[in-house]
Amino acid sequence: MNDIAAKVLEGDPRSIARLITHAENTSPLAASQMKKIHPYTGKAYVIGITGVMGSGKSTLIYEMTKEYRRQGLKVGIIAIDPTSPFSGGALLGDRIRMTELATDNGVFIRSMGTRGMLGGLASAVYDVVEILDASGKDIVLVETVGVGQAEVDVIKIADTTLVVLVPGLGDSIQTIKAGIMEIADIYVVNKADRSGVEQAVAELESLIDIACNDKDRKTPVLTTIAKQKKGILELVKEIENHKNYLKKTNRFQAKRRKRYEAELVEIIRKRLMNFIFDESTFKGKVESLIDQISKKEVDPYSAADEILGKILK
Amino acid sequence: MNDIAAKVLEGDPRSIARLITHAENTSPLAASQMKKIHPYTGKAYVIGITGVMGSGKSTLIYEMTKEYRRQGLKVGIIAIDPTSPFSGGALLGDRIRMTELATDNGVFIRSMGTRGMLGGLASAVYDVVEILDASGKDIVLVETVGVGQAEVDVIKIADTTLVVLVPGLGDSIQTIKAGIMEIADIYVVNKADRSGVEQAVAELESLIDIACNDKDRKTPVLTTIAKQKKGILELVKEIENHKNYLKKTNRFQAKRRKRYEAELVEIIRKRLMNFIFDESTFKGKVESLIDQISKKEVDPYSAADEILGKILK
């Protein structure tokens, strides 16, 4: 086995970081190494944390990580929110606190940009989850902002998804109504020392009563004050409850299967797109077709037919 | 020419709506009709409007539309923000005001979900822009929330992109720092009757001084109070200035070429994905590979190799 995959399996942080970078750049090395680590994956429990800016997601993740570490578990953190302190996007004080975790060998933090990635956001995140999993992390926390199609697609790979809200922010409820509801396994009303917390919980409960699809389980609503470490233990316990529920009802395997399906789709998409738009054999043809579209000599759908005719059996 | 394409060219609202639905569902009819309308496109000027929730984008769009109508121009509105009043996601009062526009025959409003779309968000939006363009709209306004990869991809098809902020909302500036900056052609500080407007403008100006890539043109910062119709005329004029600048410097054709390139990429992606994941010939093979991945009998990269080997020449 090549050095880098072997070292990832040993949990070596530098090798983990290197392989992630290769995966993000869809380098040829990435595929061969990803193939090697796959048999050692599937052990990590993946928790998605989503919510609008200012809902305190990062502080929550910080405190959850500290709790998991107390339990002796190893934690990987993937921050996709560009304004997350983990990504260096927030206030300096927060940022320093988050990077404190980075000095702990049982924690690996990676922030990911949402733009300019050759293979698309989702495919890179799937790879990072596999890499952290293979490296021996027991828990992988994925942080995203709860708006945007790509972000929601990403969070769908989680075993348990937390949707984080704050009291008195009408926007939060709006976001939920607009479609986040379907992905929430647990609601967290953070900053519960603010006024309006009872109202926020009540609004959520009534939304859940209307929208809840799963007859066997009502989506729980928890309150936390992450900055004061309040409600963290209860939250970690509720995640464990959800995990047990998934396993008991065979939903766990179904979720994992969906993740692998999404991963396969992404790899194929990435390969095909690179093949068509980056391979020198096609580049000239594609460029000339785009020129023809601009001049109205051909339409985009017919141009697509022509390219597909050249590559498909 | 088939009825539906011909009627779209005549501007018939029901036919426009029907063709959009076909395009969203990637129905077989869509491609044939899209081919027919392409020669009649390219006339509409596309304006992207992006910004966080609560920045008043919809009110701005409402007032801009009324101004364009006064100038005798026809307007298409595509609302991608799920919390937009155009999408029915906001307060009732706003919603009623927006739908008032729908009774004007020179205005066509379409709201689009960001999830569950077979072909992906971007490809559907490109089609809708082409349809509205072919239907004789002079201006097409595309509203998105400024967070999320898919949303930013969508806004890149605009000729002029407005980034809307509000004073005193630190989050706005954070968002911009995080990557929106590159796509802004004009900044709009809306709700300029709030305190902190001078500070917001000053912060923006200094960010622009640091980050502005285009040496020929400094990104302008405008202030508006959309609810009081203040600054709308100036904004419409500034958009016209940007249009003239694009045309004078040959950037207009380059932008349009990029839009067609993005459109072609999306159509090809959509076709290939449907071919692999929806065609009955492959479905069984794909399903069995996903099972094998779940059981660690094969890894996702090798599975992708196998499928691609079957379809590529």
Image (cartoon, coloured by chain):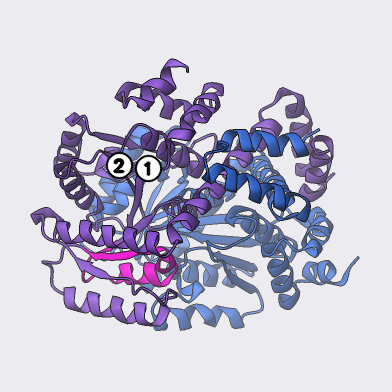
Chain colours: A blue, B purple
Circle 1 crowding by C-alpha within 10 Å: few under 14, some 14–19, many from 20: few
Side of B241 relative to B41 (left or right): left
Asked whether residue B162 appears in the rendered view, the answer is no
Per the image, label 2 sits on a secondary structure element best described as: loop
Residue A18, given in percent of the width and then of the height, sits at: 73, 73
Q: Amino acid at mark 1?
A: Lys
| Magenta segment boundaries in residue numbering | B164-189
Is residue A12 left or right of B198 when viewed as pictured?
right
**Residue B242: quarter of image:** bottom left
**Mark 2 nearby-residue class (10 Å; few <14, some 14–19, many ≥20):** many
The label on residue A303 is none
Inter-mark Cα distance, 1 to 2: 7 Å
Q: Which residue is under mark 2?
A: B138
- A22 is within the stretch colored magenta: no
Q: Which residue is under mark 1? A: B43
- Residue B93 point in image, percent of width and height: 13, 41
Q: Position of residue B275 (x, y in %)?
A: 69, 31
